[in-house]
Image: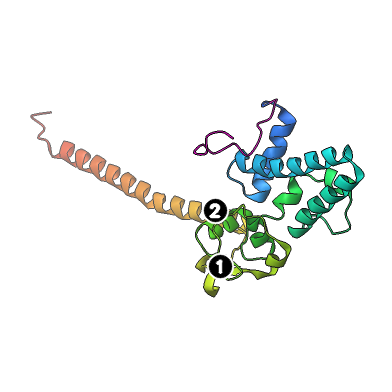
Amino acid sequence: MGNPKRIRKKYKSPKRPWNRGRILSERDLLEKYGLTSKKELRVMNAIIAKKRDAVKQLLAAEQEVAEKGKKAIIDSLNRIGIVSQDANMSDVLGLNVTDILERRLQTLVCRQGLARTAKQARQFVLHGFISVNAKRVNVPGYIMKKEEENTIDYYMGIKPKVMDVEMKKPDLHQKKEETEKEEKIGSTQKEPETKKEEEVIEDVVETEEKEEDEVPKELK
């Protein structure tokens, strides 16, 4: 049983931690689904791996046991919207981590247009702006059931103010023109300063020439 005070690990670390292909694919999934760490990704992967292992065990079991186990696995996956009710064992074996990532609350908030990006959806969930069945849910990794999917909304109908701000893509051509204008204005502002410096130098030279002229011839 183990120590009840100690929380058990919910995922398995990869056997080859420095596999380049796996690292790149995990990085893409983290960016696409707005995950903060690889731990979240591996927890989701462990859920799918557990279902696949259960199916593999049922393939070697007796027919009656296999039928009951198959029905239980498909019902559990159908409840969260990953497979249909008429799915078979091969469908379960073909599942991957993206199938369950699409059922997370964070992903569905973004898909339904309640947030602009996956990272913003995560922020809304953590800050308590999202509700499921009119109840506040602040867990981005909450696995949604099919009947709950249409009940996602802003908590108490309060829309975050940031969603009222229009997001405009920066016009690179316009930005270039603005920088050129600023450079021109800066150059025009520098010109008078240089002119003033030249005028000051000329005045100093003239005063020195006048002083030389005023010096008595005896001193010369």
Query: Residue 37 occupies which quadrant of the picture?
Result: top right
The residue where tag 1 is placed is 135
Residue 50 placement, left or right of 71: left
Quick one: label 1 or label 2, which is nearer the N terminus? Answer: 1
Query: Residue 47 occupies which quadrant of the picture?
Result: top right
Magenta-highlighted stretch: main secondary structure? loop
The residue at the point 58 percent across, 44 percent down is 36
User: Residue 131 location in percent, x, y?
Assistant: 57, 66
User: Residue 115 location in percent, x, y?
Assistant: 61, 62
The residue nearer to you, when weighing 146 against 20, is 146
Which segment is the magenta one? 1-16
SS class, disc 1:
strand
The residue at the point 75 percent across, 59 percent down is 79
> CA–CA distance between discs 1 and 2?
53 Å
User: Residue 112 location in percent, x, y?
Assistant: 68, 65
The residue nearer to you, when weighing 83 against 101, is 83
Q: Residues within 10 Å of mark 2 (few under 14, many from 20)?
A: few
User: Residue 29 location in percent, x, y?
Assistant: 69, 44
Residue 180, disc: 2
> Disc 1 marks which amino acid?
Lys
Report if residue 5 lies within the magenta region: yes
Quadrant that contains the N terminus: top right
